[in-house]
Amino acid sequence: MEAEGILALVPRLDARFDRAVELLHGCRGRAIVCGMGKSGLIGRKIAATLASTGTPAYFLHPGEAVHGDLGMVARDDVILAVSNSGETSEMLAILEHLKRLGTPIVLLTGDPRSTLARQSDVVVDVSVAEEACPMNLAPTTSTTAVLAMGDALAMVLLDRRGLGPADYAALHPKGTLGWRALFRVADLMHAGPAVPVVPADTMLKDVVVEMTAKRLGMTTVVDSAGRLCGVVTDGDLRRLHLRETSVLGLRARDCMTTEPKLIRAEELAAKALEVMESFAITSLIIVDADHRPTGIIHLHDILRAKIV
């Protein structure tokens, strides 16, 4: 029933939704989310989501507002009111002050014909056919629908503001999400002398020496011009020794994987982790414009940075 309630909102992403986005996007102050009871709890989450995605916002409890907290509201703010009935007495009590300030009101409500709706600048219909409660009383489907609509507003605003991963990380400096958005491959990769490299004609014994010295479980293989032509991994060596033929006399080019997975240095480390997991590998190679290996990022580097 809650899923159906959310799907029923899709046709309502109309001109009123667009107008709500415009008001919030053009707000020179803050988005002040306001609601009582369960609507208030959902409102707190909406305010937190807006604030964490680039729209300055805070939650104002209407019960506290009538006892002095209305002083938090300024003329440049926008009110995002949440009221399923549209008749919440505490919300109605602060209407006169908001009207006097000229603060625009965007209302998320289950009754577009309610008193609050008639006094609001934009009314977004979040009504549902029925609550998931067996008695059709406890706010369940209705609160889920409001939450989804609040998320929709926040995500469109995020897009309109051009918020990128670095901006998001700046707003979440200690959270795991921000941590994931902060580190790029260039921040974690092994570079310079730490990159294992062998020419394609290197004897297998010397390949193992390079792999052991650099301790990344692999080595890049390059041609005579220093361009990447393959990799040799611990797995390749194990599979090689399972052959019935002798490995004596083999060179790097005889046992290398010729199309290793690459990643750009400017990519997020989280993206590197995603690629590794997709292909069940533990390392990715970074190359320059001439296809020469310049770096290696290993799974352990990402795990040590807590990008999980």
Image (tube, grey):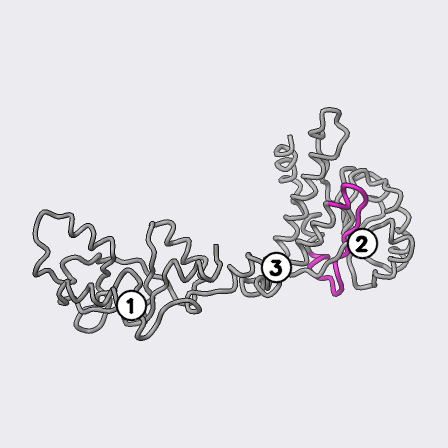
What's the mark number on residue 214? Answer: 1
Taking the image as shown, residue 207 lies to the left or right of residue 303, namely: left
The CA distance from mark 3 to mark 2 is 25 Å
Res 203 quadrant in image: bottom left
Which quadrant holds the N terminus?
top right
Q: Earlier in the sequence, mark 2 or mark 1?
A: 2
The three-letter code of the residue at mark 2 reads: Leu
Q: CA distance from mark 2 to mark 1?
A: 57 Å
Q: Which of 250 and 115 lies nearest the eye of the viewer?
A: 250
> Mark 2 highlights which residue?
60
Q: How many marks?
A: 3
Identified by mark 3, the residue type is Arg
Q: Nearer the viewer, residue 100 or 193?
A: 193
Residue depicted at x 64% and y 48%: 151
Q: Is residue 40 magenta?
A: yes
Magenta segment? 22-41
Q: Is residue 124 left or right of residue 203?
A: right
Mark 3 or mark 1, which has the lower sequence index?
3
Q: Residue at (83%, 63%) from the top-left corner?
A: 74
Q: Earlier in the sequence, mark 3 or mark 2?
A: 2
Per the image, the residue denoted by label 3 is: 160
